[in-house]
Amino acid sequence: MARNYHDTCKELIEPALEAKGWEWKAEFLIPAVGPNDPDSRSDYLLRYRGIPLCTLEVKAQNRPAADGMQRGSFHASKLQIRFSLASNGKDWILTDNDTG
């Protein structure tokens, strides 16, 4: 049976991040940058030695990881971070938002 979003995060994403030594903040609030820009939430903000390097957008295990690419890139751009990831726990897609 495919995992839902929450189970994908807890059973697949977080163990994978721990195994690779990432620091992260789950459900990271991204404040609005203008009067017509609402606050938003990134599923994860990945850090290395405290420096934010990447946003991570998670999809349920039965959804394509590619479904999270646009939102992950959007969050990275709001935070002025070059990289974003999208994952469903099996597939991981890294995007360089500077070069596409």
Image (cartoon, grey):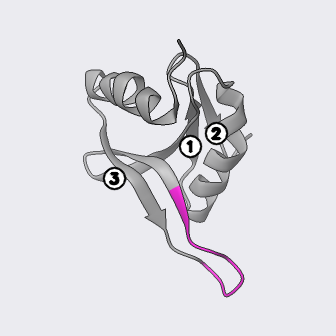
Q: Amino acid at mark 1?
A: Phe
Label annotation for residue 96: 2
Q: Is residue 92 left or right of residue 17?
A: right
Q: Amino acid at mark 2?
A: Asp
Q: Secondary structure at mark 1?
A: strand
Q: Amino acid at mark 3?
A: Ile
In the image, the segment drawn in magenta is 33-41
Residue highlighted by disc 1? 83
Assess whether residue 38 is covered by the magenta stretch: yes
Label annotation for residue 33: none
Assess whether residue 40 is covered by the magenta stretch: yes
In the image, is residue 29 above or below residue 21? below
Residue 71, percent from left and from top: 67, 49
Residue 82, percent from left and from top: 57, 49
Tag 2 and tag 3, C-beta contact below 8 Å: no
Residue highlighted by disc 3? 51
Q: CA distance from mark 3 to mark 1?
A: 13 Å
Q: Is residue 6 left or right of residue 59?
A: left
